[in-house]
């Protein structure tokens, strides 16, 4: 019996845009069991990052807000606790790393002081002790010369090193849940592999749970235990990683897997899913993927399919399978 | 760093040389001078004075004489005061300086605080209100604003003196004297602050708005830091960086005097003296003072670059 670290139920997060109100996260539910890595996959703009920001409570109130749903972290309702209580969880029990390591650190403060900051904020600890911890963390994320790195400024380090520093900051208070929002997207391929290995081994050492957001299916195959595929703010398919990769059910997931270049196979043209992600402001009740789907039926354009569970724990929201289950 | 400063000091020489040429010839080529401007002088006396002050020499020769004196530290001789220019500047500059310094500090502190607050609450009622007030203060001419505050605070309410630097006929000393000067300073400082605050507030609002959109602010929030720390430690320092240049532009103004405001409040500052020197064509004083301001401007620029190096690790000069 595994305990659940994070549980998201019917999350609805809306943003105001020039076109009107859009639902970046639309009735999304999932949970993360202790020690597991859950991957959130989808194209750019499908609401993956909005899920992360909703959990962290970092949505700019001028731009949008969580409108409905529940988020429980260790049974604490994150949407209904006081601001300062949420602040005390952030960086302490839940921490986050971001896509762009080059801009995610303050350019005028030393790397060391930025690692020490969350430790000093969340723990009663002397400055000297915090520094010792920071130096340890720098070593932990695989950078040598920790003293030298401690005193350097972000512009003096490479992107890969900065992302390691971001990981060090995220791990500084030994969080139970780490949210990684496309942590390797801005890095080149060899560094990507190193960072993923680092994240995976640290996660195992510390029995952390991880929510990894990515659009790279290669990354998913490497680290995920469980995969959630999002499209236009909705979860359209989810399941254990092996099942999902071997037997994708939703036409969108099938398309994504087909679009992934395979090493050693040279194709004239890479497969692409035709069409574009729809404008979230003008969506009507329908399957949001119907415009681009090669199996589109008349019902797909009229009603939004609900999610249904298969025997192998896979869940999918698609009309193709509804009919089967009805029959 | 030492080499860099020396190099920059060396670069100042041609700049100041160019400034001296401009200043001297612009003033010298203007028709008329102090002697011509006095209708009470006889022709013989005029010729005598021309000879005495060297006006009969060709302009070029006069430039080099002037430049030679400058290099010896002699700014010239004020015809109006019958004193060396250096001494005249020394007599009046500090009264301008205290007013300018007080209003500079007030302007910056208030502008930074208001700028941050309206950036953090962009488009709120506070932000809108501040924008309106700030633009109104900016758009009001200094003489009008000066007269209004005199009317309200000096005439109607009678709280503060209307002009001058000390109460007429008083010969106070020590703390009493300082208190008297401070009372007289309030209105001019208020006017200068109101005039300066508008642009600066908008400037800090814009800077801060840019900074709080940055990724590292999101990181700071994700660390669970208090909002106050996020804004002041992570935001403000980055928003202040570009203001260093602006600050260096303000430094010469500390010594430049506020011409109109000093005139209105009858403040015995260098700005008022400068204005007077224009009307009676005391060119040596004008030239001497202008080259003095040029020197301070060039030095402020150097100072700005040095400050930048200290404040922003990205532009720190490599040793």
Image: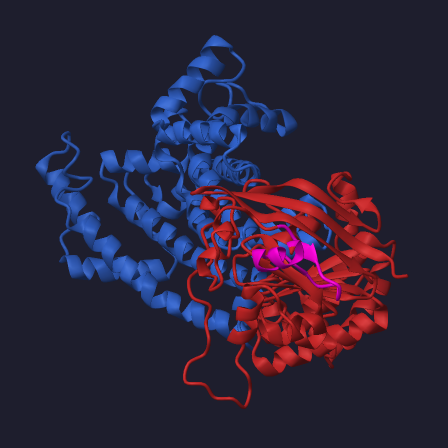
Q: Residue furthest right?
A: A1
Residue A255 is one of the magenta-drawn residues: no
In front of the other: A105 or A73: A73
Q: Residue furthest bottom?
A: A264
Residue A256 falls left or right of residue B142:
right
| Residue B49 vertical placement versus A247 (above, below) | above
x, y (%) of residue A13? 61, 45
Q: Quadrant of residue B12?
A: bottom left
Q: Does residue A186 show up?
A: no
Residue A320 is one of the magenta-drawn residues: yes
Per the rendered image, the range of residues in magenta is A306-326
In front of the other: B75 or A250: A250
x, y (%) of residue A181? 64, 62
Quadrant location, the C terminus of chain A? bottom right
x, y (%) of residue B79? 28, 41
Q: Residue placed at 47% from the left, 30% from the top? A: B128
Q: Residue placed at 39% from the left, 36% from the top? A: B258
Residue B98 falls left or right of residue B76:
right
In front of the other: A243 or B78: A243
Quadrant location, the N terminus of chain A? bottom right
Q: What chain is the red one? A: A
Residue A54 falls left or right of residue B97:
right
Q: Residue placed at 48% from the left, 50% from the top? A: A301
Q: Residue furthest front?
A: A327
Q: Quadrant of residue A156?
A: bottom right
| Residue B177 vertical placement versus A30 (above, below) | above
In front of the other: B8 or A199: A199
x, y (%) of residue B62? 20, 57
| Residue B151 vertical placement versus A253 (above, below) | above
Q: Does residue A23 show up?
A: yes
Q: What chain is the blue one? A: B
Q: Quadrant of residue A115?
A: bottom right
């Amino acid at each position: 019996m595994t305990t659940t670290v994070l549980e998201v139920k019917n999350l609805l997060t809306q943003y105001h845009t020039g076109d009107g109100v859009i639902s970046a996260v639309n009735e999304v539910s999932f949970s993360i069991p202790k020690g597991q890595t859950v991957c959130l996959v989808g194209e750019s703009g499908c609401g993956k990052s909005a899920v992360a920001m909703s959990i962290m409570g970092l949505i700019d109130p001028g731009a949008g807000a969580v409108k409905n749903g529940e988020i429980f972290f260790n049974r604490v309702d994150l949407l209904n606790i006081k601001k300062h209580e949420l602040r005390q969880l952030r960086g302490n029990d839940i921490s986050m790393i971001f896509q762009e390591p080059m801009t995610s650190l303050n350019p005028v403060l030393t790397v060391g002081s930025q690692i020490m900051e969350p430790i000093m904020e969340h723990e009663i600890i002397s400055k000297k002790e915090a520094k010792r911890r920071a130096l340890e963390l720098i070593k932990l994320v695989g950078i040598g010369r920790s003293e030298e790195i401690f005193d350097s400024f972000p512009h003096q380090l490479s992107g890969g090193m900065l992302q390691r520093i971001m990981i060090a900051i995220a791990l500084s208070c030994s969080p139970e849940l780490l949210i990684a929002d496309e942590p390797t997207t801005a890095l080149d391929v060899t560094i990507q592999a190193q960072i993923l290995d680092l994240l995976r081994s640290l996660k195992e050492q510390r029995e952390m749970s991880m929510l990894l957001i990515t659009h790279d299916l290669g990354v998913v195959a490497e680290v995920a235990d469980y995969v959630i595929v999002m499209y236009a703010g909705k979860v359209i398919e989810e399941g254990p990683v092996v099942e999902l990769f071997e037997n994708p059910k939703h036409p969108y997931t099938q398309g994504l897997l087909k679009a992934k270049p395979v090493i050693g196979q040279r194709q004239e043209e890479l497969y692409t899913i035709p069409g574009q992600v729809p404008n979230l402001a003008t969506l009507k009740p329908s399957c949001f993927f119907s415009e681009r789907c090669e199996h589109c039926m008349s019902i797909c354009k009229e009603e939004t399919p609900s999610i249904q569970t298969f025997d192998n724990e896979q869940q999918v929201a698609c009309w193709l399978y509804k009919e089967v289950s009805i029959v | 760093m030492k080499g860099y400063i020396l190099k920059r000091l060396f670069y100042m020489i041609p700049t100041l040389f160019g400034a001296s040429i401009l200043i001297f010839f612009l003033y010298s080529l203007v028709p008329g001078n102090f002697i011509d401007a006095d209708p009470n002088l006889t022709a013989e006396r005029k010729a005598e004075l021309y000879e005495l002050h060297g006006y009969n020499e060709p302009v070029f020769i006069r430039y080099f004489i002037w430049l030679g004196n400058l290099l010896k530290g002699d700014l010239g001789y004020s015809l109006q005061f019958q004193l060396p220019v250096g001494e005249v500047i020394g007599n009046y500059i500090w009264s301008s300086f205290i007013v300018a310094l007080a209003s500079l500090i007030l302007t910056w502190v208030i502008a930074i605080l208001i700028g941050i607050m309206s950036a953090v609450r962009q488009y709120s009622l506070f932000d809108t209100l501040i924008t309106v007030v700030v633009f109104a203060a900016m758009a009001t001419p200094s003489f009008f604003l000066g007269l209004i505050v005199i009317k309200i605070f000096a005439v109607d309410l009678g709280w503060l003196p209307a002009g001058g630097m000390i109460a007429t006929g008083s010969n106070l000393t020590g703390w009493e004297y300082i208190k008297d000067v401070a009372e007289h300073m309030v209105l001019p400082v208020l006017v200068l602050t109101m005039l300066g605050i508008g642009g600066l507030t908008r400037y800090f609002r814009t800077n801060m708005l840019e900074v709080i959109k940055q990724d590292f602010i999101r990181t700071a929030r994700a660390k669970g830091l208090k909002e106050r720390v996020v804004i002041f430690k992570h935001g403000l320092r980055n928003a202040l960086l570009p203001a260093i240049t602006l600050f260096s532009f303000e430094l010469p103004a500390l010594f430049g005097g506020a011409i109109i405001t000093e005139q209105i409040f009858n403040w015995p500052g260098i700005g008022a003296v400068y204005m007077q020197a224009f009307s009676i064509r005391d060119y040596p004083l004008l030239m001497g003072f202008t080259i003095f301001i040029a020197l301070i401007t060039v030095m402020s620029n150097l100072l700005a670059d040095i400050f930048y190096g200290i404040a922003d690790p990205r532009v720190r000069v490599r040793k």
